[in-house]
Each structure stands twice: as structure tokens, then as C-alpha cells.
Amino acid sequence: MTRYAMSIDLSACVGCSACSVACTMENDVPVGNHRLWIRNTTVGTFPNLTVEFRPEQCLHCENPPCVPVCPTGCCYVTDDGIVDIDEHQCIACGACIAACPYDARSMHPDGYVTKCNFCRHRLEEGKLPACVETCPTLCRSFGDLDDPNSAVSIAIREADRVDVLRPEQGTGPNLYYLNAPSSFGLTSNIWDVKHEEGAH
Amino acid sequence: MVEWYGLPWSQHFWHWPTLFHFAFVALAGGMAFVTMVATLRDHPRKRTYALITMGLIVLDLFTLWVESPARWRFTHVWLFLAFTPTSPIWIGAWGLITSMVASFFVWLDRGPRQVWGALLVIGSSLALVYPGLALSVNVNRPIWSMILIVLFPLTGMVTVTALAMLFKQAWAKAFITPLSLASAGIGVLYLWGLATGVPEAQQGFAYLWSHGGPLFLVGLALLVAPAFLRRTPLLAALVPFVGATVVRSLIVEIGQHQFFGF
Amino acid sequence: MGMDRREFLKLSAASVGAATVAGQASAQSLLDRIPNPFAPMPPQWFDGDVETVYSYCENCFWKCGIEVKVAGGKVRKVDGYATNPKSRGMLCPRGQGAPTQTYDPDRLKRPLIRVEGTERGDGQYREASWDEALDYIAEKMFAIRDEHGPESVAWFGHGSGDKWFASYLPGAWGSPNAAKPSVSLCTGPRETASQYTFGRGISGHEQIDWSETNYIVLIGHHIGEDTHNTQLQDFALALKRGAKLVVADPRFSTAAAKANDWLPVKPGTDTALLLAWMHVLVTEELYDAAYVEQYTLGFDRLVEHVQPYTPEWAAEITEIPADTIRRIAREMAEHAPRAVIPVSRHVVWYGNDTQRNRALYLVNVLLGNYGKPGGYYFCDAPGVDAYPAPDLPLAPSSGGCGGSTTDVEADSPFRDSVDRGLFYGSATAVQEMIPPMLTGEPYPIKGLFSYGVNLFHSIPKVDYTKEALKQLDLYVAIDVLPMEHVMWADVILPEATYLERYDDLLLQSYKTPFIAGRFPAIEAMYDTKPGWWIAKELGEKLGLGEYFPWEDMEDYLDTRLRTIGSDLEELRQQGTIVRRGRPYFADYERFNRNPLGTPSGKIEIYSERFADAGFDPMPTYEPTEQPPAGSYRLLYGRSPVHTFARTHNNAVLMDQHGENEVWIATKEAERLGVANGDYVYLENDAGVREGPVKAAVTERIRHDCVYIVHGFGHKAPLMRLANGRGASDTALQSSYTLDPISGGAGLRNNFVRVVADAPNPNHPPIKDLVADRSPV
Ligand code: SF4
Ligand code: SF4
Ligand code: SF4
């Protein structure tokens, strides 16, 4: 079976946002919505600094809290592990937006919820998701986790460090962050970062 | 320093009209509960109550429709064509529609009263419970803690009882004080739970506190007030009504924050 | 009534028919408008037929090859493609978002002529036909020529079409006063330094052999914030291969965040750092002796010259510890020749820039990397003959980024350019074309063409420029957007965007030189025209028709391509034609040829020519002016999603980054009482105040400088998204330090104060400013 996943090598990512803009154009994402955005967080004090460049998007959780709360069943998981939305059944109630721990879902101005779906239409044509294809630092890998030779499997295997976002939420993300630059892993939220900054 | 290119959707997804929904659904669910009791007991005013229940449900659904970004897409039929029992909103939708149908027959005064009563038991409890449930399932938003599953039905009943008092329903007087006091008690428990909970919950408490703490306390105080207002039924009804609505609204509004965005 | 019955019947039948059709149509559309919850979503653009057109990107001038996806008559997406050496299938954010500009409702739509009797800057225009607009221009130009001579028309250009407006047309017309901001406001000094050291320029694509290098030292080079696509790819791949990275920058830049060592060098002291590295390499005999022996001239003089520049000396100046300086020099030597200090773009910093870049080259030379794998490779543009046309009366004079220019011959009937003699090099300096508009010295400039050059966001001393513009007899702006400077012009000519037009061939110097074509993906919107068309039409009106013998651009391109045995159709199918390059010395030596173009045929460590002209023959350190107490040096740089000041009305890109922030060191901000996210003003000594601009209080910058991203702070009400957001660094550059060698305008000797407590301008979100939230 296919289990699609993505990895982003944070040691290479420069936070340039090419992925985000490519996503917007490819998926006709309205101005003001983002399926993918970049968070660049600085940790430390001069001159001992670390900057984490972190693109964020739907993590296609193994155990997606957004799906069971959907009252119409329009949020679903494909056989390939992609968490997708059948927009024309969406009633825009916002339950899934509330449930997502990563703010990955947004309300389309036409009255339905929208988010990253790994560019399913491109996968069907045998292409990579738009963000992966365009990334000028080649820090994104995509593929089938069940295939040990897929780009994503190899990237994860070869990484010195693998993290997922908010693991305490028990969502089982399928987006892996590789080689996070800070010694403590991913910067989790602004409260922690303040704390870290103070600690230095 | 955090720099953003593009932003996550960490803005509020529910806006002020939603607060009206949370107020009306409390009244609708509570009224269905009252109708249920009246039906089972064959209370003389059961038909009036049933009519009011229907009115409140319609009002609530109308608010939902008005605030819905999918207003003109009529996709709401999918609520009733899908089977998604894990979704509190689906549960609530069925709770409301069941209450609606049962109330209709009660109002017509046709058919087996016991069956309508039984349906109303289910419908009203689902309708009363689901708002709190819909919030507390979001474990990612710490302000929406588990206690809301109790707090929301209770405060819902406070509002409907207060309404009944305003319309001089004799039975209401007996219930307003215990319901309000129970709500206030659970409300205190809720705050205490947040303040002493896991770090996330404590962040939630701090956030709730800084964004509406005093108002929340006022809300709780108003819920305690009926105990001291026995002589003035008008106030004894209005004051806890406001208190319950304030507490509910603050939780819905402020609780949308999760400590991950920007 | 003169209508006969039959006619009447016919008419009424027709009208009944029409009414029925209309009735059906409205019933139909009414039905359509009732949403059907069971209907699938309307199709996405990629569900139907998608046509692919090859082109190259124009959102910055790196010019990556793109595939343009057209669906339903609209450009929906651009992608890179694998066979193009610049995109290799990838694009940067600006390239990805570029199509949004084509659909920007604020675009210039038809030719405009300033209403007679209004002042420049009043912004009162009337619409005109192309014919009228071009006639108007021609008439004024003849008048200028009659009174002052053809040289009194200056031509500024930037972008793919600048060939026409900053080289070809001025050459045909007879004005040497053609200039590009990409020279004296950007790369001029590095080009001059390279010419006088190696006898070759740096190509528009910096010729760094990223894929072979193992040790990289960046000095003020903002890779990552500057998202030049291929460079970013190469940089990332080099790091992934394990190349070591050192970044010297007063700011913890994106590149610094990836570095093994960050040297927070004091601004303005880079040359001292470079000299100390030379000192270590020379005195510790770490340099590549064989290379120096074989390829260079004047090394013994350098040995002597660098003696005083000890790391201890440099440590005092640069505030980088001496052992760090020493260690880095040794590490470079260890990795040499696969260790490189890449030259950057925008090198006009402090006025001593040619010498600083020479110092940078010389360190590379000591490492023996120039012309060797892992250092600087050689590249030439692929040769394609020009279209057969009569020789221009005056050789094109603005040069490329490469900046090479031709002097006006002594026996030429034309006067030399107005900036001749102000500096040593032969390039034209755009900022030096402004004063003659006001002073008339050495002769007046009376006419100005600005093709895509943002006069108020690139040339320092903006107020002075505005005064100068008022003195002109003719000012023509050719642009896509109603930029502030455009709305000062007498005639505004709206250009078609890169997706709507042909352009000349892209002949790219590169490790594998290549030819890329630009093909229109859609018809030009509104009444806009491509640059080549405007140039040809105007040329004809100026009586210069003989220099434009081609029918149209298809004829022009096809004819040129046939000289290399290809044709337009082939390029249309392929997009890019790649040639073999000769990247290293070995590739020349095999044929007994020498790629070095200096008079001596060697790398000139010691420059006789500089010595003769009275300049230091080898680089020295000159201290730069320091900020007065209470002021900060104003540094500026790039946002990864923006280019120059050109992309700030692009809804998609502005939605990514909608205003610039001023970086202030935490301690300084505390002292000033400024909190992160507060709004402040920036104010310089000349009394220019910019802002309100948001403060980013950060640990990522030294205490003695502040930093903003360039290109924001537009004052152009017709650009609804750009207008009034952030602060303009150019506006704060009320002075510059002229590089006496290259003519570059050193821009980093400008100092600003931070004024706290500016009002929050409460910018509405970009989405609220666009009517249609679709990205295209
Ligand atoms: S395109 Fe690549 S480098 Fe740029 S932000 Fe996205 S993942 Fe990072
Ligand atoms: S990231 Fe959010 S939207 Fe995506 S699957 Fe997980 S919970 Fe759902
Ligand atoms: S680097 Fe980016 S903006 Fe520049 S040409 Fe390439 S894709 Fe276009």
C-alpha cells in the first residue's frame, strides 16, 4: 500500500517561500489564505544564534483529529494516506479548523474549507507536489513511506535528526522535519521560544 | 524574532454571530428538555412548550444559516445524508432535528405521547450536550477543556429556566437557584482545572485570564446571585441568564486560541 | 411609414426570436445560479486543456527558463524545466508568483500624455493613441536635438527590453548617455575590478564553481534572502555535499544561519579582513605558489604590501578576533583551490568598492582558484549573429551588468557622455546623469527615457532627482505599473508584461552557455505593447527606420537563430539550446589560448594601469565614515519574495510579505524604548523621514547599524497594494560616496536615527485590497 509522506530538511531550507507561492498558484489559493506558510524563528543571543526556517502545511496525520469531527464526512483519508476534503459536501462549520492542532485548514471565501492535499492532481499525473518540485534548496522529499527506496524514506533514513510538530498531540504526522538546527529540536511555540531566549 | 512569509489560519474561525448560535442552541436544547418533561408528565402547557421549542430551533438554525460561509451552497443536506457519529456537530444536528420532529407531533397532539417523549429525551440531551462536546473534543485548544461537557448543558438549562421565569412559569423558580449555583460551581472547577493542569492548560488559563478573566468572574458572580435575589424574580431570572451567557460566550470566543499560531 | 409588410414581419420575427432566446438564456442562468449541493465543484484550471509555452522569467533578472501553463486563455502557473540550466525545473518565489502581475488591475493600460499646463508630479494625464504618443515624443526629441544635440537625451533601462532603450535606440539616435542602474548602483565596481585584474568581466551569472567547491566564504552576500534561483540551488547542494561555510556580515543573515562560522564584521571594514587574509596566506606561505607563478604578475610586490596587515591589525578594525581571522585563512588554504570567496551582486557599499573587490579577487587568486575547479570558472555568451542592419552611428554604450562599455572615439562626431572624467572607468553611471539636468554641465541633459528603471527607488538623492526631472523638456517612462516616477513622465508608454511578448534572445554566459527564448503565452492585455515594438515604431518616427529593418520580432529572432543553424520554431519547441562551455584554464590551454584579457596576459595582482592613473596599484584599507552618536548605519537587503521595487503591487507576493521591518539590535531598542512590532520613523541628517515602519527587535544584528529590506515605501497612490507600506531605503540615501575608479555610488555611508512612537498605520490585509482574490 502507498503511504504518502513528505520531509523537509531544515538544515537546507532558507525559508524563501517559493513552496508557498508555488502552492498558491498551483491550487488557485485565494489571496489571504495559505495552504503552506513559512515560520522563521530566531533562538539565542548575539552572536550565538540559531534560526529555524520552517515551512508548515497540513501534515496528513496518521490519526487526524480533523476528520472525525466533520459532520458531513467531507473530510476523509484516501487509501494513500492523504487527508483530503470533498469541498462540495463541506458546510463550512469550522469544526475541522478547530480540531487541527497546526492551523493547516482555512476557510475559502467561497464557503468551504481548504488545505494542502499533497497536490493530488499532480500525483495522479506522476508529478511531485508543486512545493517539492519548485524548492530551490531541494530540501523537500516526497514519496511512499512503505517503499524504502522512495525519496522520502531515504531522506528520513539519512537524517541526523527527525522531528514532527507537536508530537504530544498524538496525531502521527506524515510530514517530517529533518535536521532541526536547535539542540532542543523544533521550536514549538512562541511561549517556549521566549523561554529559550531567556535561558541562553 | 519570528518572521512569517504567508500566515497560518490562526485567526478566529468562529465570529460574533456564532455566539448567538451558542446562546440560541442552549435555549433550544433546554426548551426541548422542558417539552420532554412536560410531554412525559402530560403537562397542560406541553403544546405551548413544543411550539416554543420549534421556534427556538428555527431561530437557532436561522442564525447558523446567516453566519455560515456556505450560506448559498445549501450543502447542509449532507448533515442528514452522512453518518458521522464521531462528529459533535452531526450529533447536535440530529439532536435538534429529532427534537423538532417530536415537538411537532407533541404540538399536533397526535400519535403516541410516550414515543415523542422518548425521542425528546434523546433529542434534547444531544442538543444540550453537543455544544460543550464540540468544544472539548479539540484537545489542541486547552481553554476548551473536558469540563465543558458538563458546564455547557448546565448553563444552557440556566438560560432556559431563566426564560421560563420571565414568562412566569411557576416551576422555574424552584430550579433557577440550584442550576445557577451548580453552574457557578462547575465554572470555578473549570478555572481551577485549567490553572492547575498541564502546562498547556496553564497557558490557556493565563490567556483566558488576560483576555477576559475579570469578565469571566463577573459572569460567575452573576450565576451565584439568584441565591440572594429570591424576592425579585425578575432579577433572579435576568441576572443568571446574563451570567450564563457571558461565561459561555467568553469560553467560545477566547478558547479559539491555540498556543501554536503567531 | 416607409417599411413594407414583409420587412416588418422579418423584423418582428427576429425580435421575437431574440426575446425567446434571451428568455431561455435567463431561465438557464437562473437555474445555474441555484446551487446544487450534489453537483461536483466547478473544474479547476488543471482539469481541462493546458497549453505549455516556453519562456524565461522576468521577475528578477536572473532569467530562469520557464514553462508557462495556459488554461482557458489565462496564464495559471509557471514552472521551471529541467533542460534550462538556470531553472533546472525549479523556480524561486518571485518567479512562481510573477503571473499575478500580468493580471494586476492597477497596470498601465494605454499610452498617457501629461495634461498640458500641469507640472511633472501632478499626475494629470489624458489617454492617447500610440501614434499620438510617439509623435509627441518624436517632435520633442527633434527639438532637443536641434537646440542641444542628440547627446542631450539620456536613456535609462533595466530589464530584458533594455537592449532597445539603453543600447540600441540611443546608439541609433546618437547619445552616449545611456545607463543602467545595474552597473553603477549594483555591480559596476566588481566588473571594473575584474576587468583590471583578469581582463574579463564577471558574467551576469556569477561564475562560481559551486558544484566543485568545498569551502565557501561569503562577505555581505545574502544568498537565501536573495533568491537567485540557480545560485540558491548550488549553494544548498554545496552545503549538502558538506562544503564548509563562513559568512562575514554585520547581520545574522539567512546565509549566516547556515554557516559554520559567522563573523559579525563591523560594517565598512571588509577590506581590512581581506587584507589580513592575504597577509596570513602570504606570510605563512599558504598560497598556491605554482598557480601564482604561472598565472600572475606582481606577486612580490604584494608580499611586501600586505606585511603590515596582520590579523591583529585587522582585529582592531573589524572587531573579529585575530585567531579567528587566522584560522579561517588557514582553513581556506587547506581546502584550496576548492575554496572560494564568491563575489556578490550589489557591491556599491562604501565608495572604495573597486579596491575591495580587487582584494576579494586577490585572496581567490592566492588560493589558486580562478579558472580552476571549485573556484571561479570562465564563461562566455553563446555566439549568435546580430540581425543584419546598418552599423549604428554610436556603439551601444550602457553595457550589461557586465558593464563593459565603449568609449566615444576621438574622431566621432558625438560628444562623450556627461559623466566622462568624473571617474576612471568607462561605464556610464546612472546617478551622474542627473546633475547635468540641473547644472547643464558639461552639457545639459534635456530629455530622458526611463525603461523599467525606478528613478525614485534606485538612484540616491531622490529629492535632487525630482528637482532635476522638473528641468527636462521631455521625460518618457516605459513601464508596466504606475510607479511614482512613472507618474511624473510627460508620456507614459505601457509595456506588455513578459508573458505577453517576445523579447530578444537570451544569450547567457554560463558554465554551459545557452540560448533561451521568450514566447508570448497570451495576447497583450489592454492597449499595451512589447518593448521591441515601441522601439521600432519610435525609431521609425525618429527617421531611424533603416536600423530596424525587420518585419517583426518573429522575423528578427528567426533570422538571428538561422545564423547558428537553428530557427524560431526549434527554439519554440525546445525553449533552451545549451552549448558546451570552457570553464577552466585547462580548456583553453589545450588549444594554446589564454582566457585572460589583461594587457600582460596575466592576472594583474599589481595594476600598472591603476598606478599610472594615480590609484593604489594594490588594494589598501581606507577607513569609512562612522555614524554620528545616536545614529545607525543604514544597511539594506532583500526579501526572498520581492525584487527591487518592482513586485510590491503583486497581490500574491505582498500577501507573503506586505511591509518591511527595520531590524534593531535588542539592546539598542531597549535604550530607545522600542518594542518588537512597534512602529518607528527613520530619519537621516538631511531631514528625510521615512515610515512609519515596523520595528523588528532582534539579536540578529550588530548594535551599530539598522537594516531594512529594499523596495518598500512606495508613494504611488495608483499602486493600491504597494502604496505607503514600509520605508524606502533609497529615500533615506541622501548622499553617496562615488567610487573614483568604477563610478559606483557607495550607498552604505548613510546614517539614520530611529524615532520611536510612530503611529500604527493599521495597514489593511492585502486580501481586503484586491477585488478578486484569485491569484491570477
Ligand atoms: S521553497 Fe524550499 S527552501 Fe524555500 S521555504 Fe520552501 S522548503 Fe524552504
Ligand atoms: S495537519 Fe491538521 S488538517 Fe492536516 S491531517 Fe492533521 S489535523 Fe488534519
Ligand atoms: S531567480 Fe526567480 S525571479 Fe529571478 S528569474 Fe529566476 S525564477 Fe524569476
Image (cartoon, rainbow, N blue to C red):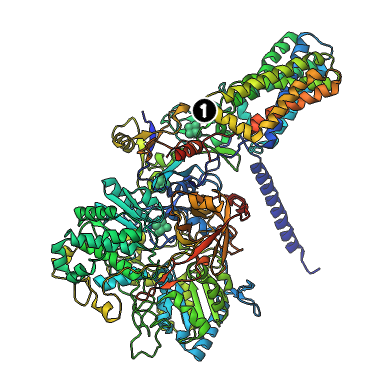
Q: Quadrant of residue B68?
A: top right
Ligand 2 contact, mark 1 (Cβ < 8 Å): no
Describe residue C336's horizontal placement relative to residue C745 as left or right.
left
- The one nearer the camera, B104 or C259, is C259
Q: Which residue is the site of mark 1?
A: B199
> Does residue C62 appear in this view?
yes
> Does residue C381 appear in this view?
no
Q: Residue at x 81, y 21 (%)?
A: B236
Residue B255 vs A27, above or below: the answer is: above
Residue B31 lies, in percent from the top left, at 75, 20
Dot 1 amino acid type: Pro
- Mark 1 is surrounded, within 10 Å at the Cα level, by few (under 14), some (14 to 19) or many (20 or more) other residues, namely few
Residue C437 vs C684, above or below: the answer is: below
Describe residue B169's horizontal placement relative to residue A46 as left or right.
right
Residue C584 lies, in percent from the top left, at 20, 62
Q: Residue at x 68, y 20 (%)?
A: B153
Residue C612 lies, in percent from the top left, at 27, 81
Residue C225 lies, in percent from the top left, at 42, 54
Chain at tag 1: B
